[in-house]
Image (spheres, rainbow, N blue to C red):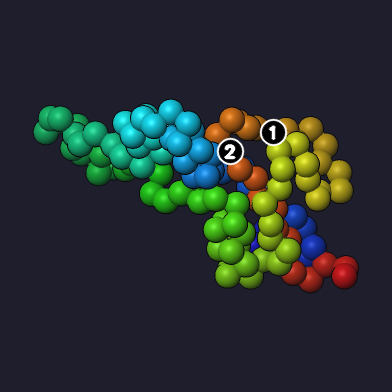
Amino acid sequence: MRVLKPGGVLRLAFPDIHLQVERYLEHRDADRFIADTLMTQERPHSLRDRPQMLLVGSRHHLWMYDGNSLSRLLTQHGFVNASPMPKGQTRIADPGPLYLSVRAQESGYVEAEKPGGIQ
């Protein structure tokens, strides 16, 4: 919010829990579902590994969103017109070389605007 100019569009690509659940319902593999969410991690196996975990931290997700829940979160934090976007589409006037379908098999897309633009 701090660096976006008024009326600017924020575009987020995120690991979409909705897509994960759809894959789970198709394959019925709970182990794969949990692994694919990246919300679990192995505990350090040795005393040597523990300081690294303390310094670097987890490389896994702490939370998962779908398009509606992430849009709601952005709205709660002051953005306007937050909504899920289909892959390959954007409200950004000139996206230039922005790749609009990054990791489309696992990602959802949300765009929101910083208030104060031309209405």
Disc 1 marks which residue? 101
Q: Quadrant of the N terminus?
A: bottom right
In the image, 17: left or right of 72? left
In the image, 33: left or right of 107? left
Whether residue 114 appears in this view of the structure is no
Q: Quadrant of residue 38?
A: top left
Q: Quadrant of residue 104?
A: top right
Residues 109 and 43: in front is: 109
In whole angstroms, how far apart are the C-alphas of marks 1 and 2?
A: 8 Å
Whether residue 95 appears in this view of the structure is yes
Type of the residue with mark 1 = Ser
Q: Earlier in the sequence, mark 1 or mark 2?
A: 1
**Residue displayed at 81% across by 48% down:** 92
Residues 56 and 15: in front is: 15
Q: Position of residue 71 (x, y in %)?
A: 61, 59
**Residue displayed at 69% across by 57% down:** 83
**Residue displayed at 46% across by 49% down:** 64
- Residue 107: image tag: 2
Mark 2 falls on what kind of element? strand
